[in-house]
Image (spheres, rainbow, N blue to C red):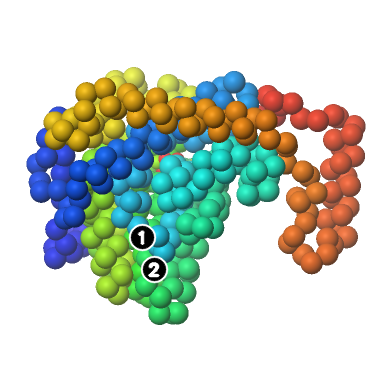
Amino acid sequence: MTITDPALSIHERIVDEEGRAVEALPDGVDDAYLRELYVHMARVRCVDQRMLKLQRAGRIGFVGSMLGQEAAMIGTAAALGAKDWLWSGLREGGAALMRGLPLAEYIAQMYCNSGDTAKGRQMCNHFQHKGSNYPSWSSVIGTQIPHGVGAAFATKHRGEDAVHGIYFGDGATSSNGFHSGMNFAGVWKVPAVFVCVDNGWAISVPSQAQTATGSYADKGVAYGIPGHEVDGNDVLACFQAMRALVERARRGEGPSLLIVRTYRMLGHSSSDDPTKYRSEEETAAWAARDPLARFSRFLEQRGVLAGGEAQRIEDELFREIDDEIHTQEAAPPMPLKPLVEDIYAEVPRHLRVQYNDFIRVGERLGDAQPGDGEFPL
Ligand SMILES: Cc1ncc(C[n+]2csc(CCOP(=O)(O)OP(=O)(O)O)c2C)c(N)n1
Ligand SMILES: [Mg+2]
């Protein structure tokens, strides 16, 4: 039922769960590049672990864990070039790091301290990085989809050759933004690849209950957009598929939809308890399919990672992350004035009034303390 593009040789899987190559590796991928991909994936995992610990210790407010999705994110995003764009949702922060978001800015944003480039106007875990075309995103599900399509249309209109990778989850396929974005993209033939990260769950709604279609890839049919589906825990399958679709878009052949099937190993966020709605057996089955373990098995068999090297890489990553955490812990808090500045040339009266009210509340109740307030999800 899905429209596919048979001219593109897209494999559902390149490395099987035992770490054996079952297809030829993507063209041009050498051992040095394989190792690079591994380090990017390992960094995502290490950052994730530290952020969760900081959240549990009450140092930061909110984390949307990326655990289990390292291959889906790194494999696809690695196929985007430096001038391409990445429109993200909650779980693409690791891709931002790979594309050039400095670790310092990543952690500053998690602390919402004075180094937060969002100036405290976003809740934490809402990254942005101008230098790598990674726009700020909204918690409102699916809104990045029409934004990305509009930007992709602008790219086409100006005759530029950038491609837009537009990321969202399985749950976002039920949003208005998905349907309007896909429709415009198909009609305008914009240079975009829609990456649907099907991680099994949209908070407590299982992926199979999200739609009556057999495959999320079918959703492209109504918009004249080809759809492909790959094993999202196989970093090389993700990379190869994304690269083929990015090149297709860059040739002017229009948008496509790529489904990367993976699993959200932890709760929806640090405020969620997944044991309330899913079984331990299900999670354990996916733990056995861990994308990082699969890739390291493959690299060890190939001689790209020597025995003990994965551990050394992890130690080095933790050192780098821990140093930065210490720096960001010591950084001053976000100054409050920028909350109302630099939107209008002069701060208008209504914002001055709101700001003064806000300061008075602070004076009356005292500064917020770690652990104050609760986020409901
Ligand atoms: C328009 C809208 N509706 C509902 C929510 C509440 N909400 C936050 S995340 C989420 C589920 C998202 O699931 P999915 O798109 O699969 O992404 P995932 O969290 O699995 O990465 C929902 C319903 C929201 N933020 N915005
Ligand atoms: Mg999901």
232 shown above or below 301: below
Q: Nearer the viewer, residue 350 or 67?
A: 67
- Of callouts 2 and 1, the N-terminal one: 1
Density class for disc 1 (Cα within 10 Å; few <14, some 14-19, many ≥20) is some
Residue ID at (48%, 59%): 133
- Measured as percent of width and height from the top left, residue 245 is found at 26, 61
- Measured as percent of width and height from the top left, residue 33 is found at 26, 46
In this picture, residue 116 sits left or right of residue 315: right
Residue wearing tag 1: 81
In this picture, residue 239 sits left or right of residue 152: left
Residue ID at (76%, 30%): 368
Quadrant of the snapshot with the N terminus: bottom left
Which amino acid does the dot numbered 1 rest on? Gly
- Measured as percent of width and height from the top left, residue 344 is found at 77, 65
Q: Secondary structure at mark 2?
A: loop
Asked if labels 1 and 2 touch by Cβ distance under 8 angstroms, the answer is yes
Which amino acid does the dot numbered 2 rest on? Ala
- Which quarter of the picture shows residue 112? top right
Q: Nearer the viewer, mark 2 or mark 1?
A: 1
Residue ID at (16%, 55%): 27
Q: Nearer the viewer, residue 113 or 73?
A: 113
The disc label shown at residue 162, or none: 2
Q: Nearer the viewer, residue 163 or 297?
A: 297
Residue ID at (48%, 24%): 273
**How far, Cα to Cα, is label 2 from label 1?**
8 Å
Residue 278 visible (yes or no): yes
Q: Secondary structure at mark 1?
A: loop
